[in-house]
Image (cartoon, rainbow, N blue to C red):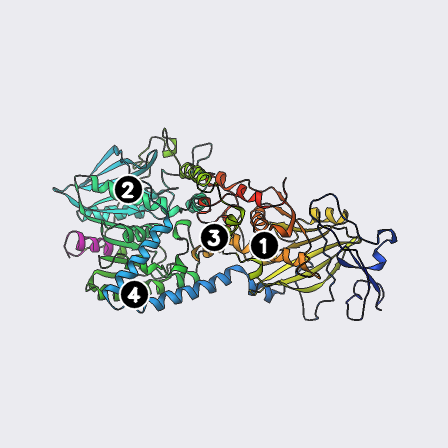
Amino acid sequence: MVQLRRVTELSCRPGDHCGGHLQNSSPCELHVRRGFLVPCDWIPESSMGSRVSTAAAVCVIVLAVLVSSPPAAFAVTDELDCLTPHEAAAVLLYPRLQQQARLACDQRDAQYAQLSTAADVQQWVETRRRYLAEQLGPMPARTPLNARTVRTIQAEGFRIECVIFDSQPGHRITANLYLPAASGPVPAVVVSSGHSRTAKTADYNQRFALQMVRLGMAALCFDPLGQGERSQILNAEHEPEHSGTTTEHFLMGVGSILVGRNTATYRLHDAMRAVDYVCSRPEIDPQRIGFTGCSGGGTMTSYVMALDSRIACAAPACYITTFRRLIDTIGPQDAEQNIFGQVAAGLDHPDYLLLRAPRPTLISSTTQDFFDIDGSWQAFRQSKRVWGILGHPERVDLVEMAGTHGVQPQNLATIGHWFQRWLKHSDAPVSIEQFTVRTEQELRCTEHGQVLLLDGEKSVFDLNAELAEQLRRERTEKFADRTPAQLQQTIRDVLQIRTASERQPPVMEDRGRIHRPDYHIDRLVLKTDEGHLIPGLTWHPRVPSDEAYLYLHDGGKTAAAAAIEALVDQGFAVVSVDLRNQGELQAGESSPLLTDWKSYYLAYLLGQSILSYRVEDILNSADFVAFYQKPREQPRKVHLVAEGQTAIAALHAAALQPELFASVTLKNAPADWTTIAGSPNPVGQLDDTIHGVLKSWDLPDLQPLIFELIRR
């Protein structure tokens, strides 16, 4: 039990800002009651004095903020808004992340400019290849392919085999192998699909394959995860649950991130297994393997050509640009196109090329592509310089054709010529041709059109669930003797959260009062030492009790108005705030399913998390509640309530600084991350994931750090 000091009385003085709170404008007598100032005409005579609550083991002292009238220049667009439009624009998360990313890109480019020798290039490449491999997480084991051909289609001058092989045990890949009618082992080009629902059978992917087979090379078109016959989420009719293939990739990403992988980890492994398969075929020369693909296929081409030394020749299409141009234009894209921390670490699009220097590589681009063409040329220029340092400038090139996102006929012919030159050692001209493509049904590999309907098939969600359970067992054994202080330090290190002594207290600026029939609301802005502004509201009953609440909600400071008013009706003062990307601090639309994925992935590229920003916001807000008009050695205690996903940030804040909170109430909150890791429907979970967190802790591990936890 904490002993309360006896409450004293105080007379107000001119300048104490009482006029806005009382009916008269002259100085009035105020009482310091239970730790805060209250106009004396609000305090019944019988309630004077102090008392100690016996209902809780720790005392909680309510905060009531007395504010002056706002400056005349202050104007807001809504009654409960606290920021001016200019202020809100200045502190939005995405633009601030853009600024950080630009600085990181500039630093990377400055370092690149210092490369002058082959030794410099080797060190640059080794550092970034190691980083890329580490961030993708350990790749699954290379197990037997168990390949089988389910059907063969004979065509003029070639045949198409519909094949199925294992990526991992119980996790299968469907593909079409195009084999020319040629004697002896031939080169082969693996074609990775873009984000098309039909994947391997999409017309542009078929044209890739037909171009190669026309030139006497084999081609393998395979279905990526979440596309074609490999949808990972089916509805009751055994059809893909989501119309957009990127949606599946994002949902796979939630669990993958939690276990320290990435959607790219699984997709890259699939692509390498596709290379394993073509190399296993006696008709194909394993020393002459190429790789290409458009859009999302260009992404996979970039990863595979950077990490798999078997790729003798590569041609990423409609993807390569620079992160600087990407961030300044369309922003981060699909889940697998973002590697944790890569922008901060200086791993840019041009580096996917540099990591394979000086092997033959062609960049295929279009002028009006949303993957910015200026960035494509910058990447090419950087590559050309490095290939020159290594003595082979002729082995890297770029083709640009007019058009929007996609592979134009001349792009395709040029790609075909590039593979012919380096895999067949022929510079014979390759003209533009028209190709007749087949239907999706003709090229199907499974009987019912989806691998999930095969016996024993495992989805990515199943694989993540298995890994999450494995990590749970490993944590139990590894951290059996971990102390609370050690866990807190781990959380601080991972989330990059400062200690209380490292943070300066926030400065409160009042933004005016709004009167309600039985209470009033004071608007405020908390200015943090890092220049962030937290808009908030203090909800005051006429006669406050001893206890204060800090109330958080996914929808921001006004979303839980009914619940807050119920607390006010009971005599409690309540502070509510907008955390990052909530309320006034939310820019644009946020998907209920995927949240604000662009902000999330820009932070992810910088090695950060939205969760860490929100934890800092909560700690700053709680600091304000605890220490407003109080000496630092005598803080108030704060009851913390959080609804929905915001409860995850609240739980971490309370675990890091439990002395601030008398109790923590979590409403409609996720119970743990282990379950989420294996869920095919992690609605609204992306914002609150941390890369690889399940290697170190899960949500239940935080509860012992908190004085009192109530789940509802």
Q: Earlier in the sequence, mark 4 or mark 1?
A: 4
How many marks can you see?
4
- Give the CA distance from mark 2 to mark 4: 30 Å
Please give the label number shown on residue 494.
3
Q: Secondary structure at mark 3?
A: helix
Amino acid type, label 4: Gln
Residue 311: percent from left, percent from top: 23, 50
Q: Secondary structure at mark 4?
A: helix
- Give the CA distance from mark 4 to mark 3: 34 Å
Q: From the viewer's perspective, tell me whether residue 278 is left or right of residue 262.
A: left
- In the rendered structure, which segment of residues is drawn in magenta? 412-429
Q: Residue at x 56, y 63 (%)?
A: 91
Name the residue that disc number 4 marks: 382
Q: Earlier in the sequence, mark 4 or mark 3?
A: 4
Name the residue that disc number 1 marks: 582
Q: Earlier in the sequence, mark 1 or mark 3?
A: 3
- Is the C-beta separation of discs 1 and 3 under 8 Å? no
- Give the CA distance from mark 1 to mark 3: 23 Å
- Is the C-beta separation of discs 2 and 1 under 8 Å? no
Q: Residue at x 22, y 66 (%)?
A: 389
Q: Secondary structure at mark 2?
A: helix
Assess disc 2: are there few (<14), some (14-19) or many (≥20) residues with their C-alpha within 10 Å of its C-alpha: many
- Give the CA distance from mark 2 to mark 3: 33 Å
- Is the C-beta separation of discs 4 and 1 under 8 Å? no
Name the residue that disc number 2 marks: 273
Amino acid type, label 3: Val
Amino acid type, label 2: Arg
Residue 490: percent from left, percent from top: 48, 50
